[in-house]
Amino acid sequence: MDHKVEAVVKAYQARADEEVAIARGLVSENRQRDLDDLLLPIGAAAAQFVNLLIKEAKARAILEVGTSYGYSTVWLAEAARESGGTVTTLELHPRKIDHAREKMAEAGLADYVDFRLGDALETLAALPGPFDFVLLDLWKDLYVASFDAIYPKLADGALIVADNMLYPERARANADAYRDRVRAAPDMTSVLLPIGSGLEVSRYR
């Protein structure tokens, strides 16, 4: 990882550290709305893991469902640069894409990311695939529907990594529903790894 990417990652981590106390203090009434303003990164361990998976698999068609402010996108794009691939990343909020674009430029990775603005399920329906690698990290109640949209567009040997399978506990029911769905799908093998907030790592065929 070169110095430009490292600098951007450090800036993201500093923001994440500052927002920990904010997240803990959010009241339940507006919690989801207010959480949506926070970085909520997958964390360094999970980010390094998916970065390595992409490089080792030499994945080229990389899909991220849930850009947020671009923390994980940096890690995906850095791997895509090595594998000769491109990251297609989906996000609902223009302000988040604007921020992520700025960070990709700072990291020297802008040429490796294709930002798609809009509802994730609508965008997924329009994307042709096939995809070699997928990172799922949006609202957890959309995981099953997202998988159903992605599944027919997976390349042979494709990997899907879904975050937040163990934490936060309030998302556990949706996480369990996702894991049940993936493990019931034909030609999928899947394992839960205690990395970060819990990653379900699944392979097609």
Image (cartoon, helix red, strand yellow):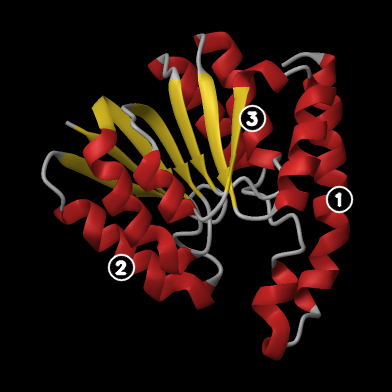
In the rendering, at what x and y percent does residue 203 appear? 27, 35
- At a point 71% along the width and 19% down the height, the residue shown is 109
Disc 3 target residue: 75
- Is 91 placed above or below 171 here? above
Looking at the image, which is closer to me, 99 or 180?
99
In the rendering, at what x and y percent does residue 152 appear? 22, 40
- At a point 27% along the width and 35% down the height, the residue shown is 153
| Disc 1 + disc 2, Cβ < 8 Å | no
Amino acid type, label 3: Trp
Amino acid type, label 2: Ala
Disc 1 target residue: 15
SS for tag 1?
helix
| Disc 3 + disc 2, Cβ < 8 Å | no
Amino acid type, label 1: Arg
Dot 3: within a 10 Å radius of its alpha carbon, few (fewer than 14), some, or many (20 or more) residues?
many
- At a point 50% along the width and 11% down the height, the residue shown is 83
- Is 176 placed above or below 30 here? above
Disc 2 target residue: 177
- Is 20 placed above or below 169 here? above
Which residue lies most toward the left here? Answer: 186
Looking at the image, which is closer to me, 19 or 86?
86
SS for tag 3?
helix
